[in-house]
Amino acid sequence: MDPLKSPPPPRRRIRADLHPTVAEGDDGTASFAAATRNGTAPRHRAPERKVQRPYGLERMRVEDLVIAYAGKPAVDGVTLPMRSGEVLALIGPSGCGKTTLLRSLNRLVELTPTATRTGRIVLDDEDVDGLDVTRLRRRVAMVFQQPNPFPMSIFDNVAYALREQGSRKPRAAELRAPVQEALQRAGLWDEVADDLDRPALRLSGGQQQRLCIARAIAAQPEVLLLDEPCSALDPRSTAVIEELIGHLADTLAVVIVTHNLQQAQRIADHVGFMYLGELVEYGPAAEVFGSPRDPRTRDYVEGAFG
Amino acid sequence: MSSPPAIAKPPRERVQDWPRIDRFAYYVCWAAGMLLCAIAASIVLYMLYRGIQYLRPELLYTRPEATPDQSKSGGFLDPMIGTFILTTIGVALAALIGISVSVWLTEYGRPAGLARFVESAIEVVAGTPSIVLAIFGLLVFQSSGLGFLSFEAEGGGVFGRSFFAAGAMMSLIALPLVVGATREALNAIPRHVREASYALGKTRAATIWRVLLPAARPGIATGLALGMGRIAGDTAIVVILLGGSLLTPLEDAPPGVDVLRGTGSTLTSYVYNNSPAGEGGSPEKAYAAAFVLLLIVIALNFVVDFISRGRKPGVQWIR
C-alpha cells in the first residue's frame, strides 16, 4: 500500500444534522476573517509550516455556487476566494463535490450535459460567463488525476497550448524559449533537454505529470487547478510534484483537490473542507487541521490522524 | 542426516480425470482448432505448389492478349494494375467517409436518435452481400446524371461500369471495417485526455485534429488494411461494375481520368474468367494469379498484425 495514502475517511462518525459554522451568514469569508485574526490555539498536533506566505491578490472567487447534476446538487452554495501566491486545498470524502467545484472554475463541468449552475464565478473581477471559454481555459489551467500527455513529442505537448487551435503555428523556433521556460518551471527541463522530440508517452509517470504541469503553465495562466495530481504516482514522484507546487504557488493561485490529508497539510496555505456539496469549513491549513471548528471537519481530519 | 520430509504436492489436474462429457468437449474444441490450421495450411501449400508450378515472371509484366492460343494470351499485368487502382479508390473513399462518420459518432453523436440511425445504416451496409451492392451500384451509376463517371453512349445511355463506379461500391465493403476500427480506437482514448485538451483552451475540432486522430492512427490504419484486403479479394463488384474486358486502356500515358472512367479487370476477375468456372481458358494462369492475390492478401494481413501489435506497451494512458 502507498504509505502516503490516508486511511479511508471516517464517514460513519460524521453527523450530518449539524449545521456548518461557516454557513452561518457569510460562509467562506467569515472563517477567512477569523483566520487573519489568528484565533484559537491548536488542540491537535498542528503541522509546522516553514513559511506562512502573506495573503496575495485575490484572483478568483466563487459566490453562492450551486452545481447540480440532473437537478441533484453536487456543490451547494459555496463561496470561496482563491488568491495568487497560495495553495488552496479542497479536502473531503469521495463524492463531496470538490472535483465538481474545481471543474466548474474553468467551466469544464459544462461538458457534462446534465450539469446546471447558479451563482457567480469571478476571475479578476470579471464574470467567467462573459469570457470566451477558450480564453478562460488558457487563464485557468488544469492538471488531471491521471498523467495524460498527448501522443506527440515532449516539445509539442508543451507548445500545444501556445499554438493556435488546430494549426502548427507559430513554428518551433519561435516557441523554444517559452517551452524551455515552462519545462524549467515544472522542474523537467534537465531531464528532457537533450531530446525534446521524444514521444511524451515514453516518459515515466512522474515525468508525464510534470510535463502536464509544464503544458498547463506554458500559456502563463493566473490560476492552476490540480485534481488529485499525485494519486496515480509513487511516493518519490509525489514528493517532487509537491515541492514543485510549492514553487508554482509563488506566482500563481493554486487550487488542489486531494484525498490525501497529509499532502494537504504539507502543501496547503488554506484548506476548504467539503461535505455533501457544502463547504463546511474554510481557513488556514494550520487552523483547519489543528483546531477545526466544525465537528464534521474534526471527525474527518482526526480519522486521518488516527 | 535425514532429508526433510517431501512436501506433498497437490495432484496435478489431468484431463483424464475430467468427467467424460468435459473431456469430449475439450477434444472437440482441440480438433476444431487443428482442423482450421490444417485447412489454412492446405490452402497456402496447395496455392504455393500451383504458384511455383505455373507462375512465370513474364506473367507479371505482360498484358493479356485476346487470342485462342493460350501460349500467346499473355500475363496479368493489367489485372494487377486494376486491383491496385480499385483498392486505392475504394480505400481512399472508405477512409474519408469512415473516419468522418466515426469521429461524428464518437465525438458528437447528437441527436442520439440520428446516431443510432447511422449505426444501423453501417450495419446494413456491412451485412449486404457484395453482389447486391454491385447490382445496386449498376442501377445508380447507370442513371443519366452520372455519365461523367463512366462512358456515355450517343443516345444518352450510360454504361455505368468503370473504376469509379466499382471503386465507389468497393468503398462500401471496406467502410464498416474502417468505422469499426476507428470507433474502437477513439473510444479507447480516456475521457480525461480530451478534457486535458479542452482545459488548455482548445476547441473540439482542434482536439480531434491534433490529439484524437493521431492517437487513433494505429487503429485507423488497421481498419484501412483490413478494408484493403476485402476490396482486393472481392469478385462480384468487379465482374458487374468494372466491365468484362481484361485490358485496362493504359494507352494514353500517363493514364488519367479516362482510365478511371473506363473498364478493366482485377486479379479476382482474371482468376474467375480463366478458371473452369468462367470461360475456362487457362486454369494454369488462374492458379498463378490466385497465388499472387493470396500473397497480396496475406501480406496485408501481416501489415494489420504488425500495426496492431506495434503499439509499444506503456504508450498507453491510465484510464
Image (tube, coloured by chain):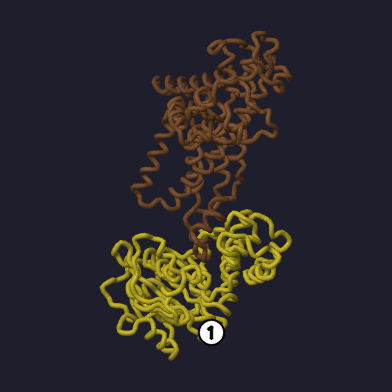
Relative to B16, is A299 above or below? below
How far from the left and from the top, in percent, is residue A89?
A: 47, 74
**Image point (42%, 77%), residue name:** A127
Relative to A118, is B123 above or below? above
Mark 1 residue type? Gln
Say which of B311 and B246 sits in front.
B246
Can residue B286 be seen in this snapshot?
yes
Q: Which residue is mark 1?
A: A52
Q: Residue furthest top?
A: B69
How far from the left and from the top, in percent, is residue B164?
A: 54, 33
How far from the left and from the top, in percent, is residue B60?
A: 70, 22
Instruction: Name the colour assigned to chain A in the rendering.
Output: yellow
Under circle 1, the secondary element is: loop
Q: To which chain does the residue with label 1 belong?
A: A
**Image point (42%, 75%), residue name:** A130
Relative to A306, is A154 above or below? above
- Quarter of the image for the N terminus of chain B: give it: top right
Say which of A290 and B314 sits in front.
B314
Can residue A236 be seen in this snapshot?
no
Say which of B163 and A79 sits in front.
B163
* The chain in brown: B
- Res. A203 image quadrant: bottom right
Q: Is residue A219 left or right of residue B188?
A: right
How far from the left and from the top, in percent, is residue B226?
A: 55, 34
**Image point (69%, 62%), residue name:** A192
